[in-house]
């Protein structure tokens, strides 16, 4: 039989500080109505003082291991654009704190597409025989890079982490990852960015402005890029998998914005009620958004064994990607 990467467990974690739209409206020129109308978000969660991305990742990773009934992994991959430090990577810290010291561990930064890129990476490690079990975690502390005076970004993003445990198995098993389609376009690098902190800015000879340290996004351009690129990659991956759009039971897209999720479903011809949505409760959690949505939907019994699930994401870079799987029957924790 063909060796495959099989989803064996899921987990998620949201930090304790809940921030409602009214909380934001008290600090900036916005309102609950303005935020809900444009994004579909009513609340999000921010890390408390003293917390870091690794703290969130450890909690989600522990839940994913528990869900899978496992205590070990050969590799730990953390997808994030908000690492604990520019150097070293966050994954080795996460691995050690989970009792997985000695395992290969590294970060991936494909921004909001990081989890889908991570799935392809984990799949490659497993199918090549390099690893038997891979713990993949998407984790973000967006609150550390949000400009409190920029309502176009500060109202959208939240902090959180989600993870999956992938194990070696066979291609015809429930939970086996199918083909993956990934893409990028560096011409759009400035559409989603943090300008300060990297070699481009540090070696420019000019000191950064205050705004350069914060996350910036050109929302209107990103909206249509996101819908177009995710729709294209969804169609491409389904064609590779030999499946039709009408066979998709659940569409799980990056939780970027409710309007993007709805437009994507409409573009694909997938009924909106088949799209998993939790952005209203957690905001846009970047690379963590898909695994958080999967973990919540599984815990609530929304995802059922045997359902055909289509995953897709779009992020800075620009990057995008999609993959498919048939949902496994996971043990409840």
Image: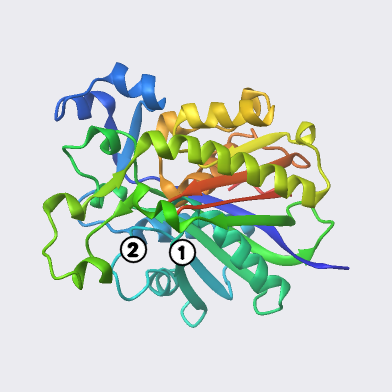
| Residue 220 spot, x, y in % from top left | 39, 33
Q: Which residue is mark 1?
A: 78
Q: Residue furthest bottom?
A: 102
What residue is rendered at 30% in x and 65% in y?
Answer: 84
Residue 152: quarter of image: top left
| Front residue of this view, candidates 257 and 239 | 239
- Give the answer, above or below, for where 277 lies relative to 46: above
Residue 325 spot, x, y in % from top left: 72, 49
Q: Is residue 241 above or below residue 131?
A: above
Q: Earlier in the sequence, mark 2 or mark 1?
A: 1
Q: Quadrant of the N terminus?
A: bottom right
Q: Residue furthest front?
A: 187
Where residue 244 appears, as percent x and y from the top left, is 80, 38
Badge 1 crowding class, 10 Å Cα cut-off, few under 14, some 14 to 19, many 20 or more, is many
Marker disc for residue 200 = none
As displayed, is residue 64 above or below residue 217? below
Relative horizontal placement of residue 95, taking residue 305 as reference (left or right): left
Q: Is residue 210 left or right of residue 248?
A: left
The answer to whether marks 2 and 1 mark residues whose Cβ atoms lie closer than 8 Å is yes
Please give the name of the residue rendered at 56% of the width and 59% of the height, measured from the top-left corner.
117
Pointer 2 residue: 83
Q: Can the viewer see residue 298 in this picture?
A: no
Q: Is residue 183 left or right of residue 24?
A: right
Q: Identify the residue shown where x is 79% and y is 35%.
A: 247
Q: Is residue 318 visible?
A: yes
Q: Quadrant of residue 249?
A: top right
- Nearest the eye: 241 or 300: 241
Query: How far is disc 2 from disc 1 in space, using C-alphas?
Result: 9 Å
């Amino acid at each position: 039989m063909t060796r495959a990467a099989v989803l064996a467990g899921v987990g998620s974690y949201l930090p304790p500080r809940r921030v409602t739209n009214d909380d934001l409206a008290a600090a900036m020129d916005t309102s609950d109505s303005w935020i809900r109308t444009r994004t579909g978000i009513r609340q999000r969660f921010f890390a408390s003082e003293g917390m870091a991305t690794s703290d969130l990742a450890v909690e989600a990773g522990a839940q994913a291991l528990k869900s899978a009934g496992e205590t070990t992994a050969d590799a730990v991959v953390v997808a994030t654009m908000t690492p604990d430090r520019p150097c070293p990577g966050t994954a080795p810290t996460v691995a050690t704190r989970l009792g997985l010291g000695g395992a290969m561990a590294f970060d991936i930064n494909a921004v909001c597409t990081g989890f889908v890129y991570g799935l392809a990476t984990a799949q490659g490690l497993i199918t090549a025989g390099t690893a038997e079990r891979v713990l993949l975690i998407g984790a973000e502390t967006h609150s550390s890079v949000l400009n409190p005076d920029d309502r176009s970004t500060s109202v959208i993003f939240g902090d959180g982490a989600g993870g999956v445990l992938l194990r070696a198995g066979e291609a015809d098993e429930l939970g086996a990852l199918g083909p993956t389609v990934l893409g990028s376009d560096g011409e759009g690098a400035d559409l989603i960015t943090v300008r300060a902190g990297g070699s481009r800015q540090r070696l420019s000879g000019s000191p950064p402005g205050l705004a350069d340290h914060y996350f910036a996004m050109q929302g209107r351009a990103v909206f249509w890029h996101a819908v177009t690129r995710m729709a294209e990659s969804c169609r491409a991956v389904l064609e590779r998998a030999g499946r039709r759009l009408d066979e998709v039971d659940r569409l799980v897209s990056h939780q970027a914005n409710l309007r993007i999720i709805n437009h994507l479903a409409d573009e694909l011809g997938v009924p909106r009620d088949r799209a998993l949505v939790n952005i209203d409760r957690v905001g846009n959690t970047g690379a963590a958004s898909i695994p958080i949505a999967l973990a919540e939907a599984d815990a609530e019994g929304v995802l059922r064994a045997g359902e055909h699930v289509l995953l897709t994401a779009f992020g800075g870079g620009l990057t995008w990607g999609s993959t498919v799987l048939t949902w496994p029957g996971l043990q409840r924790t």
